[in-house]
Amino acid sequence: MKQLNAFWMSLALVLGFAAAAVPAHAEDTDPAQPQAPEVSDETLEQFTTAMADVRSIGQVYSDRIANAEDTEAAQALQRDAQEKMMSAVEDAGLSVQQYNAIAQRMNQDEELMERVQEML
């Protein structure tokens, strides 16, 4: 179980989901800051493609990591999964930074979340 938790933690770090970088609530942001630009439908399509691939890879590898022979094997599987997830994002036409920015923004933007759900 610790190996599985370590997998998700390292995945979060590789994909850049640093909670400290994202305010917990929209009220915590500086009102003087301009709003982020609108995310185009094309970009959201790329994002949803990447998100589906990342989830699929995560599901496959979580079982493998949980059943790894030892910590070293689990870490190798984690690295492999991370590389495949990053490649999936880039293959969808986004940088990892763009993917992360959209994922983080979805946590604060109900309308963006609804648009993504409609595309799924």
Image (cartoon, rainbow, N blue to C red):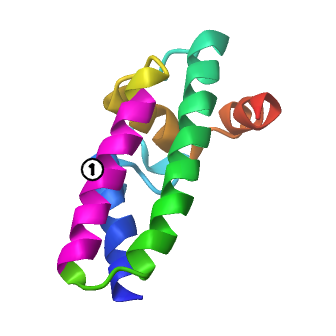
- Quadrant location of the N terminus in the rendered image: bottom left
Q: Residue drawn at (35%, 79%), measured in percent from left and top? A: 68
Q: Is residue 28 left or right of residue 78?
A: right
Q: Residue drawn at (45%, 17%), measured in percent from left and top? A: 93
> Within 10 angstroms of label 1, few (less than 14), some, or many (20 or more) residues?
some
Q: Is residue 66 left or right of residue 106?
A: left
Whether residue 72 is visible: yes
* Residue found farthest to the front: 69
Whether residue 18 is visible: no
The part of the image, by quadrant, that contains residue 64 is: bottom left
**Picture coordinates of residue 105, whole percent (x, y):** 51, 38
Q: What segment carries the magenta color? A: 72-89
Q: Is residue 120 left or right of residue 72?
A: right
Q: Residue drawn at (29%, 53%), measured in percent from left and top? A: 80
Mark 1 highlights which residue? 14
Q: Nearer the viewer, residue 60 or 96?
A: 60
**Picture coordinates of residue 115, whole percent (x, y):** 74, 29
- Quadrant location of the C terminus in the rendered image: top right
Amino acid at dot 1: Val
**Location of residue 112 with respect to 52 vertically, above or below:** above
**Picture coordinates of residue 39, whole percent (x, y):** 57, 17
Q: Residue drawn at (30%, 63%), measured in percent from left and top? A: 77
**Location of residue 24 with respect to 84 vertically, above or below:** below
Q: Nearer the viewer, residue 42 or 38?
A: 42
